[in-house]
């Protein structure tokens, strides 16, 4: 995973925290939503991560005229055999890059719902299973809203994490100019891992220990988002599962085989903030979902240290 991170950082200069969230999402068997203004490297992050893994990769440019069958595939009549043949769509890949997902109609956006949740596609009453690993990396621009369709809550809830890249600092931008002005590092990127290795790492992440106290703390944090007056819609039970999976991946990337509360804190904002729907009063007070998650983390009591929190069973 360090080799993958180093490979991606050759393209996305000066954003190690963003790259780490992307790797956490990959190891948590989730999907990533990259939301930011144009020109900060949203698509470059998705492409760099996809190219760093030697597996099948496809890219979908979402547009208003895109149809669901353009994503999932379509059955075509074969005159020679007299049967319908299924032609798989771009979603049949290990890494699916969906560029500007909010430019497609809700009908087309919904084509990804089954894929992202159940890792399968149903076309003409026939269900096709997608390969492992499977990850959707979608990008969207939250500023330019003309001709776009906001992702519904059900769609956003299927993204394990949302990340905003932001502008680089001056030193990183200067390094980017020096390195990228004469060539495109994305074209020169070579895979440093493969699908089999990633699946082995994912299986190791599933085995990361999480103590009952830490599990209870994760549930308490998610439940607290449903009781905040500023929130009209809190985090779902699905988010609790993905919260814990992301914390396991965060612990593994930190070199531990057990989860501590700091792992939950590290992934809380990327995993929970995009799922919350604020009230009109919160918007008027210029409160963001990120602010609400931070206040919840400060308010919910953190379990105290002990053998169980350090991966040791009780005696």
Image (cartoon, grey):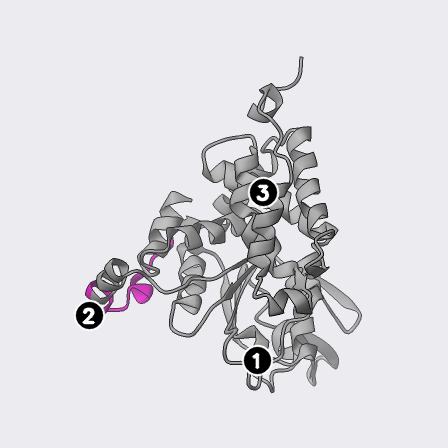
Residue 267 appears in view: yes
Q: CA distance from mark 3 to mark 2?
A: 47 Å
Q: Which quadrant would the C terminus be assigned to in this image?
A: top right
Circle on res. 298: 3
Residue, disc 2: 182
Sequence-first tag of 2 and 1: 1
Q: Look at 54% across and 54% down and name the residue there.
A: 270
Q: CA distance from mark 3 to mark 1?
A: 37 Å
Q: Is residue 228 left or right of residue 5?
A: right
Residue 202 appears in view: no
Q: Look at 41% across and 63% down and name the residue there.
A: 166
Q: Which quadrant would the N terminus be assigned to in this image?
A: top left
Q: Is residue 237 left or right of residue 43?
A: right
Sequence-first tag of 3 and 2: 2
Circle on res. 311: none
Q: Look at 57% across and 86% down and name the residue there.
A: 147
Question: On screen, 71 above or below 202?
Answer: below
Circle on res. 103: 1
Span highlighted in magenta in the image: 178-192
Q: Do the numbered discs 2 and 1 sit on residues whose CB atoms are within 8 Å?
A: no
Q: Secondary structure at mark 3?
A: helix
Question: On screen, 204 above or below 294?
Answer: above
Task: Mark 2 vs mark 1: give the one in front.
Answer: 1
Q: Do the numbered discs 3 and 1 sit on residues whose CB atoms are within 8 Å?
A: no
């Amino acid at each position: 995973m360090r080799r993958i991170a180093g490979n991606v950082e050759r393209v996305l200069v000066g954003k190690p925290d963003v790259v780490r969230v992307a790797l956490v999402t990959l190891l948590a068997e989730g999907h990533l939503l990259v939301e930011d203004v144009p020109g900060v490297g949203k698509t470059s992050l998705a492409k760099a991560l996809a190219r760093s893994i030697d597996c099948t990769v496809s890219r979908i440019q979402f547009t208003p005229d895109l149809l669901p069958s353009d994503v999932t595939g379509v059955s075509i009549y074969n005159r020679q055999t007299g049967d319908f043949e299924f032609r798989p769509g771009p979603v049949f890949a290990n890494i699916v890059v969906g560029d500007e997902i909010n430019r497609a109609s809700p009908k087309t956006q919904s084509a990804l719902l089954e894929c992202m949740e159940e890792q399968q596609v149903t076309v003409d009453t026939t269900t096709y299973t997608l390969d492992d690993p499977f990850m959707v990396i979608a990008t969207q621009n939250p500023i330019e809203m003309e001709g776009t369709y906001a992702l519904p809550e059900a769609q956003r809830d299927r993204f394990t994490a949302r990340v905003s890249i932001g502008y680089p600092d001056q030193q990183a931008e200067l390094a980017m100019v020096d390195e990228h002005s004469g060539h495109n590092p994305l074209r020169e990127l070579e895979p440093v891992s493969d699908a089999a290795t990633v699946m082995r790492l994912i299986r190791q992440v599933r085995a990361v220990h999480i103590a009952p106290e830490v599990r209870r703390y994760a549930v308490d944090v998610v439940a607290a988002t449903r009781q905040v007056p500023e929130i009209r819609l809190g985090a779902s039970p699905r988010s609790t599962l993905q919260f814990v999976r992301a914390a396991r991946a965060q612990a593994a990337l930190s070199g531990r085989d057990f989860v501590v509360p700091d792992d939950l804190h590290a992934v809380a904002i990327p995993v929970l903030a995009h799922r919350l729907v604020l009230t009109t009063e919160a918007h008027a007070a210029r409160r963001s979902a990120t602010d609400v998650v931070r206040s919840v983390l400060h308010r919910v009591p953190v379990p105290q240290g002990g053998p169980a929190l350090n991966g040791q069973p009780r005696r």
